[in-house]
Structures are given as structure tokens and as C-alpha cells.
Amino acid sequence: MLKIEKVFKTFNPGTINEKKALTGVELTLNEGDFVTVIGGNGAGKSTILNMIAGVYPVDAGKIWIDDVEVTDLPEHKRAKYLGRVFQDPMTGTAGDMNIEENLAIAARRGKKRFLGWGITNKEKENYKEQLKMLDLGLEERMTAKVGLLSGGQRQALTLLMASLKKPKLLLLDEHTAALDPKTAKKVLDLTEEIVARDHLTTLMITHNMKDAIRLGNRLIMMHEGKVIYDVSGEEKKNLKVADLLAKFEEVSGGEFANDRMILS
């Protein structure tokens, strides 16, 4: 479902601020894979999601989504393949629009636009059923402005919007990092439920090593723009946080430098 082949990316090349973000990263995801991604600060985790989404052009290498090469496709043309939830709950929704309008926009991702009634009664009923799954009471507030919702409610709505069209690939960029622990657990539980229900191929960056071990069928660790550890199946299930720290030190030759990860 996803193939990344020898992708390189350097920001501000030739300047004092030059940063080699990706250094020949290679990654393949099979259909239905739920892959958690961990790594220290500046490891290239968010950059790889941005490259997949087309936010930045690659310096070298190729990217395929569902056997379609998207390396040179602009961001808006890749949107039909992807769903994405960002770290900031305010990023994935339009705060000045109401809940059902946000869902309608998500439902039309990748489709041609035309003049007609904005949201049909059939669509409204479908959105109501989808919102009930969140168990947040939002199905009774479909005409409420999204800007009035809490961060957790907005993130849950963003997750629903990102998965509404059953994307080829769901990208989750530390999507619970800005939430309090109780709300983060709720959003993670929803993530697990939606991914399993729709059999979504998913790439999830997390700063929580326990979540990285518990969720998904595969875990990868990044360091200095490359995948340095890739584990799945029973081996992944039997991992402990101490194992991951030891593996990082073994492969990278240094200590894990991410305070948020170690604290969590």
C-alpha cells in the first residue's frame, strides 16, 4: 500500500541552518499494516509523513501509494489517497463551520465539485450514525460550530473525518500528544476501533513507547533520517520499553534523546 524508496530530504541546503532530515529512508507497508513510529528529536518522523502527503518535494527517491507513483504529485492530488490527523487539534477542522459541514467537506475529498444542495438529508443521517460511534454526544450538536468544541472533541472529529472515505493510507502525527491523558486514551481507543473496523493501512507517530508497543502489528524506530529498527508479530508483542531503549543505544551508538518519550 505504501513504498518509499531511498528518499532524501535536506532543508536549507548550503546554509548554516542546513538540516539533513531524511537520508535514504526506505519503507514498505502492506495493506492493513498498522505501523507505529518512534524516534528521538529530529529523527525524521514528521518529515516522512509530510513527504508522503506531498507537503515538501523529495530531493531524491520515489514514493508509491497503492502501486501509484505519487513522487511528483502535488499535495492536493494526493489527498484522495490519504487521511491525516495532526498533533494540533485545531489543524484538522474548520472552526468557523459546523460539525456536519466539516464532515461534508471530508466526504467530498478527491471528488469533483459542482453546484447543488450542500448536505442532503441522507448524508445528515449517515453523519449522525458516524458521530454516535464517538460517544461524545456530537450527534446531537451537528449544527454547532466546531470552534466551540474542546480539543479532544475536535481531535475525535478530525479522526472521523480522516477515515470517513476509507483512505488508502491513514497518517497520524502524534495525534494525542496535545491532549490530557484521559482524552488521549479515548482518542487512541477510537483510533484502534476505526482502524480495525475499516482495515485501514496506518502509519502512526507517537512519543509514548508503551502505546507504540501495544498498538498495531508493527513498530519502526527512526534515527537521523533512516529506519534503524523494524519489528512485528510476536517479537513486537513481547517488547518492553527497556528493550527499545537498549536497541536504540545498540543501533545508534548513543542514548535516546527525547524527554517526552522517556517520561511517558
Image (cartoon, grey):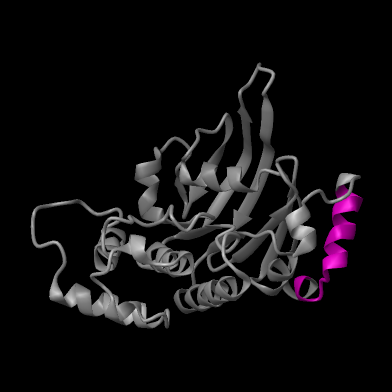
Q: Position of residue 16 (x, y in %)?
A: 69, 18
From the viewer's perspective, is 235 left or right of 194? right
Is 238 part of what is drawn in magenta? yes
Q: Position of residue 249 (x, y in %)?
A: 89, 51
Q: Which residues are magenta?
A: 236-251
Residue at image position (69%, 66%) is: 212
What secondary structure characterizes most of the magenta part?
helix
* Residue at the left extreme, as displayed: 116
Residue 34 visible to an observer of this rendering: yes
Q: Quadrant of residue 264?
A: bottom right
Residue 62 vertical placement versus 145 (above, below):
above
Q: Quadrant of residue 246?
A: bottom right
* Residue at the front extreme, as displayed: 148
Residue 166 visible to an observer of this rendering: no
**Considering depth in this image, is 224 or 260 the residue closer to the camera?**
260
Residue at image position (21%, 75%) is: 124
Residue 262 vertical placement versus 17 (above, below):
below
**Considering depth in this image, is 80 or 12 the residue closer to the camera?**
12
Q: Position of residue 98 (x, y in %)?
A: 26, 64
**Considering depth in this image, is 38 or 95 the residue closer to the camera?**
95
Residue at image position (76%, 75%) is: 237
